[in-house]
Amino acid sequence: MGGFAFSLVLVVHVLVGLVVIGLVLLQHGKGADMGAAFGSGASGSLFGATGSANFLSRTTAILATVFFITSLGLSYLAGSRPAAPKSVMEGVEMAPAETPPPSPSAPDSKSQSIPK
């Protein structure tokens, strides 16, 4: 379950980050308000003269909060993961080496007497 939750929060984090970048790029800067004062036609837009700025800034604030929460969630999930082994052989249990039993066809040197 931990790996799935981490992946899900990571995907949401990346998508929210990309949407926040797009929303910030769509917003007008402080200097763009001067052009609106001289009649740049913003009042005929879908949200009205200031409606788009309020909608975009509120959406950006909400998504920035979601981004912050997913950042905290990712740090918590990454900290609660078990530590990865530092070596390939770290988790391997080595059994003691067993000596094979003597084969029955081999003569036993102690039981045989050497003829003279």
Image: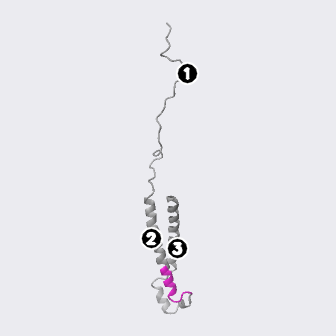
Along the line of sight, which residue is nearer the eye, 6 or 36?
A: 6
Mark 3: few/some/many CA within 10 Å (<14, 14-19, 20+): some
Q: Amino acid at mark 1?
A: Pro
Q: CA distance from mark 2 to mark 3?
A: 14 Å
Q: Amino acid at mark 3?
A: Val
At which x and y percent is residue 75?
43, 63
Indicate the secondary structure of the residue bearing disc 1.
Answer: loop
Mark 2: few/some/many CA within 10 Å (<14, 14-19, 20+): some
Q: Is residue 100 magenta?
A: no
Residue 82: name its quadrant. Answer: bottom left
Q: Which residue is mark 1?
A: 104
Q: Is residue 99 depicted above or below 40 in this figure?
A: above
Q: Which residue is mark 3?
A: 19
Q: Which residue is mark 2?
A: 68
Q: Amino acid at mark 2?
A: Phe
Residue interval drawn in magenta = 46-58
Q: Nearer the viewer, mark 1 or mark 3?
A: 1
Mark 1: few/some/many CA within 10 Å (<14, 14-19, 20+): few
